[in-house]
Amino acid sequence: MIDKTTIAAANETAESALRAEYDALGEALDRRGIDIGAVKDKVSAYGIAIPSWGVGTGGTRFARFPGTGEPAGIFDKLDDCGLIHQLTGATPRVSLHVPWDDADPADLIAKAEETGLGFDAMNSNTFQDQPDQPLSYKFGSLSHTKAEVRQQAIEHNLYCIELGRQIGSKALTIWVGDGSNFPGQSNFTKQFERYLASARDIYAGLPEDWRLFTEHKIFEPAFYSTVVQDWGTNYLIARELGERAYCLVDLGHHAPNVNIEMIVARLIQFGKLGGFHFNDSKYGDDDLDTGAIDPYRLFLVFNELVDAAGTPGFDPAHMLDQSHNVTDPIESLMNSAMEVQRAYAQALLVNRTALAGFQEENDAMMASETLKRAFRTDVTPILAMARLEKGAAIDPLAAYRHSGYRAKVTEERPASGAGGGGIV
Ligand code: LRH
Ligand code: MN
Ligand code: MN
């Protein structure tokens, strides 16, 4: 964390310009019948979870080029996440990945209190082998042909639930890499039946007030077929398991050009949208910064979410899931959280009555323009004002660079290894 007075000093210099910009935007929105204060209050109440694994430099399967002052473990990661929240006021929770972040629950709670954070969904990991693990996941985990391997994977998920329960999490996210690399390698039907049976055992261990999120992904690490490959399969899983099972949509887990906002709408319509892993992509699961490639698509996803707001029981979880290879992860995560807020604010500006009218009259041009008008509005002053009022930074990036935080942790933390590929 950085000294509050440093943020206050930076804000003081920027405040009068911000107030002028905010007032001008407020007048413009007023002419459109929009109350800027109401939009700001919604943005201010919005929070998105940071993936613990995002604060370290990622990597590709070819190489990893670590930065300096990389977090050495979960407690360093929570320090970085605390700073991101301090500067943006937008990231109140952290999503843990087990066993990467496994630790004594009492220590996790103490660190979360110190850094002003809470815990979001727990993520299990049966896509890698751990050093002390008796059986390998080379040929799958929850859908493995051998019952012992499936049981080991089930027990790991139950362990994640138990750890999460002790630290106040309310959801488990399961993503498996299970699939096949050759036609004929696996029987699609039997493999999916085994997955469902394992998932049922995990669902049976879910506390009453928890939700289970299953995450689909089209490919990788299996390159011929993947067990939970798309939203259709994911929907079947959620429907088979029960009412507390939902689908998680990671924006990078679809084929290029897939209409993700429409998938979102379908899952909302049938009560099965559990949450998001936000990121951006050009080719596949690139895990690029949210909004870096296609901010309009992000806006269109939020357009669906705002449209569905108020539907009973509608409460999707919002998380980032990114891999940072060439930027300082703290900077990427701050910017990404703000990009998500931006899409949300823009979606709040859509004139929904007008849109419904244009849809009814089949006026495609004006319907499209109604969305574009909201998307083209620069809502930056709204986001910045929400931050100022919370004591966060008007310009988080500038405040972070000015703070010297990275140089400080570089002195304190051991150098992180470069070398081979990997996702963390
Ligand atoms: C899989 C995935 C999933 C994992 C994370 C590390 O590609 O999106 O959410 O838990 O990456
Ligand atoms: Mn993901
Ligand atoms: Mn992914």
Image (cartoon, rainbow, N blue to C red):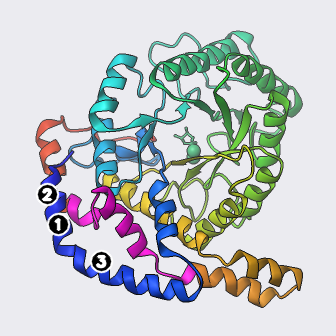
Quadrant position of the N terminus in the picture: top left
Q: Are there few (<14), some (14-19), or many (20+) residues within 10 Å of tag 2?
A: some
Circle 2 residue: 6
Number of marks in the rendered image? 3
* Secondary structure predominantly adopted by residues drawn in magenta: helix
Circle 1 residue: 10
Residue 271 sits above or below residue 176 on the image: below
Ligand 2: quadrant of the figure: top right
The residue nearer to you, when weighing 385 against 255, is 385
Circle 3 residue: 18
- Where does residue 248 sit, x and y in percent of width and height? 66, 44
Note whether ligand 2 is within 8 Å of mark 1: no
Residue occupying the point 40% across, 53% down: 324
- Where does residue 399 sit, x and y in percent of width and height? 21, 62
Amino acid residing under circle 2: Thr
Q: Mark 2 and mark 3 in contact? Answer it, CB < 8 Å.
A: no
In the rendered image, is residue 278 in sight? yes
Q: Could you give the CA–CA distance between mark 2 and mark 3, rounded to whole angstroms?
A: 18 Å
Residue occupying the point 45% across, 23% down: 167
Residue 373 found in image quarter: bottom right
- Where does residue 304 sit, x and y in percent of width and height? 70, 63
Q: Could you give the CA–CA distance between mark 2 and mark 1, rounded to whole angstroms?
A: 6 Å
* Magenta highlight range: 375-400
Label 2: state its secondary structure.
Answer: helix
In the rendered image, is residue 180 in sight? no
User: Does the magenta-highlighted stretch encompass residue 391?
Assistant: yes
Amino acid residing under circle 3: Leu
Left or right, 103 with reference to 175: left
Label 3: state its secondary structure.
Answer: helix
Left or right, 130 with reference to 358: left
